[in-house]
Amino acid sequence: MSCTRSYRFVESYLPESHPVYYNPISGYRDWPLVSLEEAVKDLASFVPGVESYAAYAKEHCIQNTPLSRNESAAIYLYTKEKLFFENLNKAFRLEYGAALQAWFPFLKLFMTALQKLPLCRTTLWRGVADITNSNFEEGDVHTWWSVNSCTSYLNVAGKFSDHRGTLFCIDAIYGRDITQYSAFHDEEEIVLMPGTLLRVMGAQSDTNGLSIIHLEECPKISQGKHVMLSYTSINQDIVSKIADILKDENIPVWFDSNGDAKNDMYDSLAEGVENAAAVCCFLTSDYEQSLSCQRELQYAQKRQKPIIPCMLTSATTWKPSDWLEEITRGLVFVDFHDVPESNIDNKVMELIDRIEDRIAKKQNQRMQSIEEPTL
């Protein structure tokens, strides 16, 4: 077994930034959740001996936690084997379609594990050895799509005492603390998820060639905006649970506790829809028959808000028709029908991915319309 220790916190390349709407791992959630052995079986050409590494991780990972044994072992494997995490992030950088897709089964298991861990709001450190950089201007926003391991220990800066390099000081709000599950419990390791959005707050350099760049993680939803949940009062229990999970993930939510039984429809439209970054509609036959829900969703469509339909009933027994079918036609549904209590968190993570994807595409459309030359 190889020993990675703090090599995960110090890379030899600068993180590549991409537009917010770029997503090299789009679709990984569509892969089934499988065992660690199954998840790595197609990675032997990238990581020789990966099967034995997986078996070792299953044997030595921490157990009896909120994570399954396979999920715990996935984190252990990532932290234990230098060759493994290096090739994972190499696949992100090279963006080879087939090569990156080979990692999707592992990513599904790994990301599912990370998303079960509580959010970590703290200051983190990450370095790039022997490379200085001038592409981080104050106010710039960068999106990092690889898996970025950071540490809360400032002494990582000591690695640069005699070298040129870049040290990132990151004010994180969506970090995931994997210390308990790491092969090395003394490293205080926090992972920044793929797609992390970072704003440059400042930069400085010393005479020895060390650059320190201060980054601040951006919220997933712009300040003053929220995700609106549109639903009927009969489904308040399930939608309330979804709202609570979204809030736990630092997603601001506009949630009328009265559902479609509103005292003031104007507030729903003026505040709920107008300030929505996206609108999630929870569909049933009752929703389709609700005049309040119809007004909300039609107004959201008129205001060109991203709409994410969520099914609360079986598509084999009921499908949207009439006005509702017109609005949701061609949209990808998030299926909450018959989701067991133990899996609702994972389903909400799928919903968050969908929300972020729709918002990013909307931003891309705006950018393209601005860039189009006028005749």
Image (cartoon, rainbow, N blue to C red):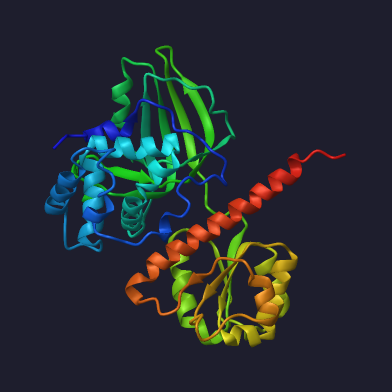
Residue 72 location in percent, x, y? 23, 55
**Residue found farthest to the top:** 207
- Residue 270 visible to an observer of this rendering: no
Answer left or right for 38 relative to 331.
left
Numbered circles on residues, count: 0
Residue, x 54% and y 55% (percent of image)? 356
Q: Nearer the viewer, residue 137 or 104?
A: 104
Answer left or right for 118 relative to 298.
left
- Residue 21 visible to an observer of this rendering: yes
Above or below residue 165? Residue 184 is: below
Above or below residue 86? Residue 278 is: below
Above or below residue 161? Residue 216 is: below
Residue, x 53% and y 53% (percent of image)? 220
Answer left or right for 273 relative to 259.
right
Q: Nearer the viewer, residue 124 or 56?
A: 56
Residue 256 location in percent, x, y? 58, 76
Residue, x 63% and y 71% (percent of image)? 328
Residue, x 41% and y 41% (percent of image)? 146
Residue 8 location in percent, x, y? 29, 35
* Quadrant in the picture for the N terminus: top left
Above or below residue 89? Residue 230 is: below
Residue 249 location in percent, x, y? 44, 59
Q: Nearer the viewer, residue 154 or 288?
A: 288
**Residue found farthest to the right:** 375
